[in-house]
Amino acid sequence: MSCRCAIMSMLLLLCVSQFGLPQNRANSSAVQDSTIKVDVDLVIINATVTDREDHAVAGLEPTSFRIWEDKVQQQIAYVSAEDVPASLGIVLDISGSMQDKISAARAAAVAFLKDGISEDEYFLVEFNGHPRVAQDFTRNISQLRNRLTSGRAHGMTAMYDAVYLSLEKLKAGRNPKKALLLITDGDDNQSRYKVSELAEFLKEGDVQIYAIGIAHDNSELSRGGSDRAAIEELTELSGGRAFFPDSVQELEEICTKIALELKTQYVIGYKSTNLTKDGKWRKIHLELDRHKRRHHLTVRSKSGYYAPVDKHLRPKISYRSRAVRRT
């Protein structure tokens, strides 16, 4: 939870400096030695709004949003549309089944890099039978682009292990917003981790997963198999999104769309009315007001978060505290 609080603090400092706080919260914030003190117990979520043509929508007023936690409506403290720096991981399938798709997949990943800001940082995880960090965190886009254009596709597929490794890697990210871009044709046949373990690990962080599952002829993704269900589960849980094109010709356009979504998101903060620090999972439901829904706008965000734990109480058993399988 300490990581979550640090992320919240960074986001709040950014948003306060650009947009201010509601009047009642501004009055209660103390300013000493040029440092703004804010409430780190605010729940922070990233939200994406799209129209009927599936285009990202910017410029909405804070009053456009409504939020519930465990079916209890909450008061939103602020809404920011500031393009905050992001820590982003590209997770690229280089297994044997990707041989005829790898060039298009790499070109699409390069397209994803084009719309970043100078403070963004990226890393690259490649996977076949085993995942590996092919490029550590860098802001040097040319360096990452060079990494993306090398190597051949071969071997088995350990997709779930690669996602786990990438989630672990993102914990070292320096920026408040964190996301993964997964490009794969599915058909995991080598992973040690299960989807349920990934889902639990994902709940404990604040990472959005965007996934492109290439649903080629007679693949498990095209048949709607377990890998497709797993990708949909993880992306929905995180507030990200899954795409299943049947042609590699669509990859570059999809990567560009994802990059734009990440840059046009809203950061929404609220203080939960449930003050119990019991470490339990709390469900979040975010929606737009009726007027915006009539205009066929939709909103997407993560589905919940773990409550903080009172330091005087026995902490909940965390997935991170279990024995970790190493690839």
Image (tube, grey):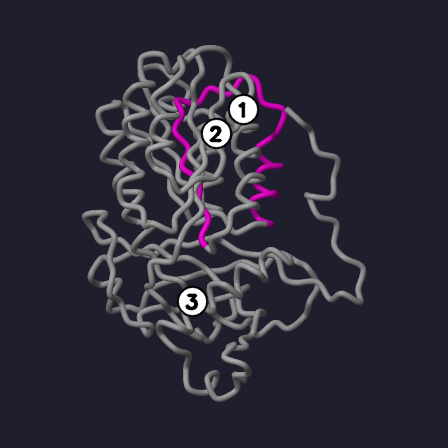
Give the magenta range: 177-204
Q: Quadrant of residue 218?
A: top left
Helix, strand or loop under label 3:
helix
| Nearer-the-camera pick, 193 or 86 | 86
- Image quarter (top left, top right, bottom left or bottom right) of the C terminus: top right
Q: CA distance from mark 2 to mark 1?
A: 7 Å
**Label number found at residue 131:** 1
- The residue to which callout 2 is attached is 125
Q: Amino acid at mark 3?
A: Leu
- Nearer the N terminus, badge 2 or badge 1? 2
Tag 1 or tag 3, which sits nearer the N-term? 3
Tell me whether circle 2 and circle 1 mark residues in contact (CB < 8 Å).
Answer: yes
Q: Is residue 241 above or below residue 15?
A: above
For the point 34% across and 55% down, the residue is: 48
Which residue is found at the position 51% from the left and 47% from the top? 173
Q: CA distance from mark 3 to mark 1?
A: 34 Å
**Sequence order check, earlier mark of 3 and 2:** 3
Q: Position of residue 277 (x, y in %)?
A: 69, 67
Does 299 appear above or below 197?
below
Amino acid on which the number 1 mark rests in the picture: Pro
Q: Which residue is mark 3?
A: 14
The crowding category of the residue bearing disc 3, from other C-alpha atoms within 10 Å (few below 14, some 14 to 19, many at least 20), is some
In the displayed structure, 120 sits above or below 224; it is below
Q: Are marks 3 and 1 in contact (CB under 8 Å)?
A: no
